Image (cartoon, rainbow, N blue to C red):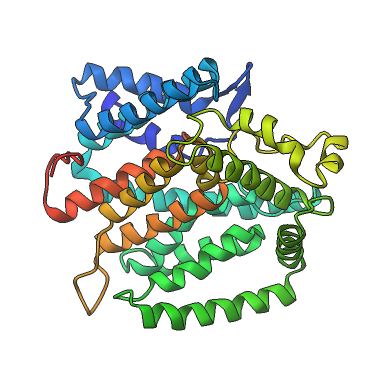
Amino acid sequence: MDLKKFVFYSTLVSIFTEAMRYHIGFDMKFFYLIILFNTVALLAFNNFVYNRGLLIFHSIIFITGTISCLIGYNHVGSFLSQFIFLLLIPTYYFSFYTYFQNRLEDIVKFYCRACLCLAVIGFLKLPLDLSEGESLHSIMLEPAHYCTIVLPAFFITLKDKSFPRYYFIIISISIILSGSSLGFIGLGLSMILFAKRISIVKTALTSVIVVGLGLGLYVVFPPFKLRFDDTINSAISSDLSKANLSTYAFLSNFYVSSQSFLSNPVMGNGIGSHVESRNLYLQDITGIEVFEKAEMDQLNAKDAASLFSRLMSEMGLIGIVGVFYFIIRFYVPNKDDESLSQKVIISRAILLYFFAKLFREGHYFSPEMYFFVFLYVFNKYDDMGRIKPDFANE
C-alpha cells in the first residue's frame, strides 16, 4: 500500500479506535499517533493547509482562553492541553478533506461499510457483553458512544438506495440492542428528518408519533424507564441522591455548567476550565455526598457529559451561538419535492451525530468528531459545486 492510500484508509479506520488508548498521565490514544504520522505525510505531499475559517476558530478559543487564565477562571496547563489538540486535529481533517475532496462518495461508502462491520462485531461480542452485565457496544467504550458514531450510517443506508437494505436493518437492530437511551432518541429524531421537506406541520405530526413510540418504549423497556424517571425526579427535586450514574453525570455537570454560564455568560470560563468550575460549584448539589462516598462524584468531570453543557460552561454564548451558526450555515436544504438528494441525506445524517454529541458527549477531539464536522462542510461545498471551500469567506 502506498503512502497516499495509507493516509486515506488509516484516517477513516481511526475514527473507530476510541478504546485503543493507554493512560500516561493523560489518555494517549492510537488515534493521536495516526494523526501525527499522517500530518507528516500531508506535509510531505505539500498539502497540510490552513484557512481563515480555522484562523477565526482558533483565535476565538485562544483569546477567550487567555482572558480566562488572566482573570483566574482557568489554569494555563488546562487551557493549553486543550488548545494544542484543537489546533492540530481540526487542521489535519481540513487538510485531509482538501486533499481527498474528490473522494467524498468513497469516504461515505467506506464509513457506512465500517459501521456495518462494527455492528456485526457487536452481535458476535454481545454474549460476552451480556455476561458482564452490559449491552451491545461493539468495540466502542460504551453503548452511547456506539450509537453516536453509527446513527449517521443508519440514516444514510436507509435513505440512500445505493446501499443494500440489509445495511440499515443490521445497524438499526444493533442500536436497539445497545439499549442506549441516546440511540432510541436518535432513531426517533431521524423520523423527523425522513420528510422530503421539513415543515412545522410534518414535524408536529412526526413528533406525535415519536412521543407515542417513546411512551411504548417507556412501558416495555425497564432501563429506559429507570433513566427517564430518575432524570425527571432528580431534576424536579434538585436532589441527586437517588439518581443512577448516567443521570448523576448529566445533571451534576449541567448544574455546574449553568452556574459557570451565569457567572460569565458571554465567553464562559475558557476552554479546559470545566474541572475548575466543578470544584467551585459541585458541593452545592443536594445528594452529592452519596457519590462522594462511592468515589464517583467526578464522573465526566472533564467533558461535562455533553458538548452543550461544556460549551455553556467554557465558551458561553460565543460557543453556543457559534455551533448553531455552523450547523445552519453548512446545512444542505432539499430542493426536490420527489426525493432526497445524496447531499441532503448526508447533511441530515450528520445532524443526528451533532444532536448526539451535543446531548451526551463533551470531548472536543474524540476520534470521529472532525471527520463528521468537515464531511458536513465539504458536503455543502460539493453540493454548491465549489472545489476548494473557504468557509470564512463567501
In this image, 268 relative to 53: left or right? Answer: right
Q: Residue at x 20, y 24 (%)?
A: 47
Residue 26, percent from left and from top: 60, 20
Residue, x 24% and y 68% (percent of image)? Answer: 334
Whether residue 92 is visible to the viewer of this picture, yes or no, is no
Residue 289 placed where, x, y %?
Answer: 85, 40
Residue at point 83%, 36% (across, down): 292
Image vertical order of residue 136 relative to residue 6, above or below: below
- Looking at the image, residue 90 sits to the left or right of residue 259; the answer is left
Residue 271 in view in this figure: yes
Residue 154 against residue 16 in the figure, above or below? below
Quadrant location of the C terminus? top left
Which x, y percent locates residue 273? 55, 28
Front one among 300 and 36: 300
Residue 4, image x, y percentages: 26, 28
Work out whether 37 lies above or below 155: above
